[in-house]
Amino acid sequence: MKVTVFGAGTMGRGIAQVFATYNHDVLLIDVEQKFIDNGINGIKSSLNKLYEKKQINEEPAKILERIKTSLKIEDSKGSDLVIEAIVEKFEMKADLFKKLDEFLDPRVIFASNTSSISITRLASMTKRPEKFVGMHFFNPVPLMKLVEIVKGEKTDENTVNYVYDLAKSLGKIPVKVQDYPGFVANRILMPLINEAINALMEGVATKEDIDSVAKFGLNHPMGPLELADLIGLDVCLDIMNVLYQDFGDQRYAPSPLLKRMVASGKLGRKSGEGFYKYK
Ligand code: 3HC
C-alpha cells in the first residue's frame, strides 16, 4: 500500500515511521525542506533507539528506504490513503483536503490526525465525506499503542473498518469513537492537565510535586505538567479552547497560566522551555 503523510512534525514523522516499519511505502510531504530534514532526522534517531533495544528487527536504513519525501502535494497521486498531520488550524487543513479532493482518485481514503477539529466539518470540505475518517495517533507515535478511529457524520462503515484493521496491522490498538469535541482521549486528558496547571497557578504545590502526585499516587507514567511539555502547551491550549467553545461549559475554560505561557512562547519541549527547561 502507498500512503502519503502530510506534515513532518512530531506526529506526522511518527506516523510515517510506523507505516514504513510495517512495510508500507510512504511519501512524507511538508511545505519546507527544513521541516522534512528535521522529520527524517527524528525518524532516524527513533529507529536507531528501537533497533538498539531490539524493539525492531529490520535495520533502520532499510526501513528509511521506504520513506520518500516531497514538497509538492501533487506527488501524492497514486496513493491509496492520505493521512494529514499538519498544523491544528481548520482553514489550513480544509484548504489541503479541498486541493487533494480535486486530483486524487475518488476511491482514496482521507484520514486526519486532528486532535480536536470536527471530522464531520473537515469531511464536508470534500466530495467524499463517506471516505473521510479520523485516525488520531498518540505521542510518541512509535511507542503509544492507541489510535482513535473517528467516525464523522457521513463516514461509511467500510471506511471505518478499513482504517481500524489497518491500525491493528501496524501493531496498534484502535478504538472506534464518534465525532464529538476532543473525541475520548483529549476530553479526559486535557481537563486533567488544565486542572494541574490551575493547581500550580494557585500555589497548591510545586510543579515537581504535582507531577509526583500523578506518578506515584495515580501510577501515571509522566506527571501532567511533564506531559503538557511533551504534547506542546499551544496544542493543549488549542484543544481546551475547542472543548470550551463546543461544549459551552465553564469547566473547560483554559487556565490563565496556560494562556500566559503560550503567549510568552513557552511551548514545552519543542521551544526549549515549558513548565521545565530542556537542552
Ligand atoms: N522513539 C523511540 N524511542 C523513544 C521515543 C520515540 N519516539 N520517545 C521516547 N523513546 C525512548 C526514550 O528515549 C527512552 O529510551 P532509553 O530508555 O534508552 O533512554 C525510552 O523510550 C523510555 O523513555 P523514558 O525513559 O522517558 O521512560 P518511559 O518509560 O517514561 O517511557 C513514554 C516514555 C512512553 C513517553 C512514557 O513516559 C509515557 O507513556 N508517557 C505518557 C505519554 C502520553 O500520555 N502520550 C499521549 C499524549 S496525548 C496525545 O498524544 C494526543 C494529542 O492529540 C495531544
Image (tube, helix red, strand yellow):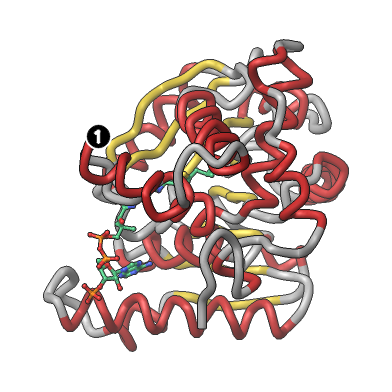
If the image is split into quadrants, where does the N terminus sit? bottom left
Q: Residue at x 33, y 51 (%)?
A: 222
Residue 34 in the image, given as x and y percentages of width and height: 70, 84
Q: Can residue 20 be seen in this view?
A: yes
Front-most of residues 221 and 156? 221
Does the rendering let one see residue 109?
no
Number of numbered labels in the structure image: 1
Q: In this view, does 98 lie to the left or right of 3?
A: right
Is 278 drawn above or below residue 157 in the view shown? below
Residue topped by disc 1: 218
Question: Residue at horizontal 49%, vertical 58%?
Answer: 230
Give the left or right position of residue 71, taking residue 231 as reference: right
Quadrant of the rendered image holding ligand 1:
bottom left
Q: What element carries label 1?
A: loop
Q: Is residue 45 left or right of residue 183?
A: left
**Residue 272 placement: quadrant:** bottom right
Quadrant of the image occupied by residue 180: top right
Say which residue appears at 64% left-offset and 33% top-offset. Answer: 116
Q: In this view, does 91 lie above or below 64?
A: above
CA neighbours of label 1 inside 10 A, class few (<14), some (14 to 19), many (20+): few
Camera-nearest residue between 243 and 258: 258
Q: Position of residue 123 (x, y in %)?
A: 73, 28
At a point 35% along the width and 76% down the height, the residue shown is 46
* Quadrant of residue 12 within the rendered picture: bottom right
Q: Where is residue 115 in the image (x, y as percent from the top left)?
A: 59, 38
Q: Could you say which is closer to the camera, residue 108 or residue 58?
A: 58
Task: Say what amino acid the circle numbered 1 marks.
Answer: Leu
Residue 9 lies, with reference to residue 183, above or below; the image says: below
Decide if ligand 1 comes within 8 Å of the CB at mark 1.
no
